[in-house]
Image (cartoon, rainbow, N blue to C red):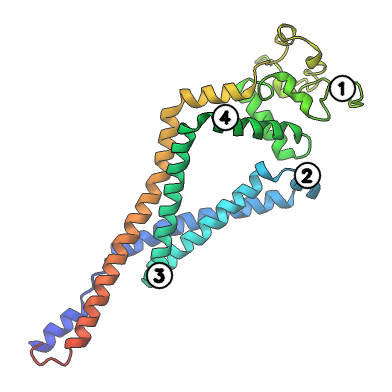
């Protein structure tokens, strides 16, 4: 009876296979997503011209994609190996990283509401810098064109902001054919337009606000963006919650598994200490 009881104690495990493999599958999914993100980022980076890619790294989506992908790869790698090997150190690293990321996201959201004026100023600075480098980077150009079409706007504060770009500058010394123009994405486009007139913004900065308004969107994108954010707060909150839930699930599963592994270690130490006890 003593040997049978000892054997049953040694076979018993506090570590739940459900928690262990659920955490592994959870991390494996995001690990594969991270590899896809890094691959897309590297491909986008390689296919761009070196000079254009280096000119404005602050809003380069390829760089951003690679950074996020590499961080996700490292964190989920710790979760995958930690759950399979039941390694407390890796699991704690995974849990701490997710907790830090979650707190940073929470802090960013709070600071964004508290310091909305400073956030607006930063957005203005980013958009103005993007206007300056509009022709330097194809990805940036496509991003700005998409934003102006989507929000039906032109420039940062107003359409004349495009004078900050060397090609659209209105000074008499500017030899560019696009002098005093705006990108075609600023233009008012009809639904039945089959061929897009890419020269529709030619000379629009020479016109006053009312005259230009007959051909292009004259309002800037910053106000349109802020108004869009205010009108879609519930949607943004849902997206933020959707990003937070997987992080909280990962933290919860890792902490449960860590506690189970600690309990298993205590059980193993107990069995080793009492293996020679004749009463067991």
Q: Which residue is mark 4?
A: 120
| Position above or below: 214 against 84 | above
Q: Quadrant of residue 202?
A: top right
Across and down, in percent, residue 170 comes to: 84, 21
Across and down, in percent, residue 38 comes to: 60, 54
Dot 1 crowding, Cα within 10 Å, few <14, some 14–19, many 20+: few
- For image coordinates 58% across by 21% down, the residue present is 223
Dot 3 crowding, Cα within 10 Å, few <14, some 14–19, many 20+: few
Precedes in sequence: disc 2 or disc 1: 2
Mark-to-mark CA distance, 4 and 1? 29 Å
| Position above or below: 233 against 251 | above
Q: Quadrant of the C terminus?
A: bottom left
Q: Is residue 81 left or right of residue 212?
A: left
In the image shown, does 257 or 112 lie closer to the viewer? 112
Mark 2 against mark 3, which lies toward the viewer? 3
Across and down, in percent, residue 157 comes to: 66, 21
Mark-to-mark CA distance, 3 and 1? 62 Å
Question: Is the residue under label 2 in contact with that under label 4 (CB below 8 Å)?
Answer: no
Across and down, in percent, residue 104 comes to: 46, 47
Q: Which residue is mark 2?
A: 52
Res. 89 mark: 3
Precedes in sequence: disc 2 or disc 3: 2
- For image coordinates 40% across by 53% down, the residue present is 99
């Amino acid at each position: 009876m003593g040997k049978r009881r000892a054997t049953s104690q040694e076979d018993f495990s506090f570590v739940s296979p459900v928690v262990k493999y659920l955490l592994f599958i959870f991390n494996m999914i995001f690990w594969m997503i991270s590899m896809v993100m890094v691959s897309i980022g590297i491909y986008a980076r390689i296919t761009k011209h070196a000079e254009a890619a280096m000119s404005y790294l602050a809003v380069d989506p390829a760089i951003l994609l690679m950074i996020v992908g590499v961080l996700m790869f490292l964190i989920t790698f710790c979760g995958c190996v930690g759950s399979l090997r039941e390694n407390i150190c890796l699991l704690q690293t995974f849990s701490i990283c997710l907790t830090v990321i979650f707190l940073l996201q929470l802090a960013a959201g709070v600071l964004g509401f508290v310091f909305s004026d400073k956030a607006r100023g930063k957005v203005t600075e980013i958009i103005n810098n993007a206007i300056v480098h509009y022709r330097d980077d194809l990805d940036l150009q496509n991003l700005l064109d998409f934003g102006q079409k989507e929000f039906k706007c032109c420039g940062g504060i107003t359409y004349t902001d495009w004078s900050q770009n060397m090609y659209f500058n209105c000074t008499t010394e500017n030899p560019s054919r696009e002098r005093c123009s705006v990108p075609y994405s600023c233009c008012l486009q009809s639904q039945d337009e089959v061929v897009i007139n890419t020269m529709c913004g030619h000379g629009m900065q020479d016109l006053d606000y009312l005259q230009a308004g007959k051909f292009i969107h004259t309002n800037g994108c910053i106000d349109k963006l802020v108004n869009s954010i205010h009108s879609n707060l519930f949607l943004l909150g849902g997206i933020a919650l959707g990003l937070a839930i997987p992080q909280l699930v990962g933290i919860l599963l890792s902490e449960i598994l860590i506690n189970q592994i600690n309990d298993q270690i205590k059980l193993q130490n107990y069995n080793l200490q009492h293996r020679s006890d004749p009463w067991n």
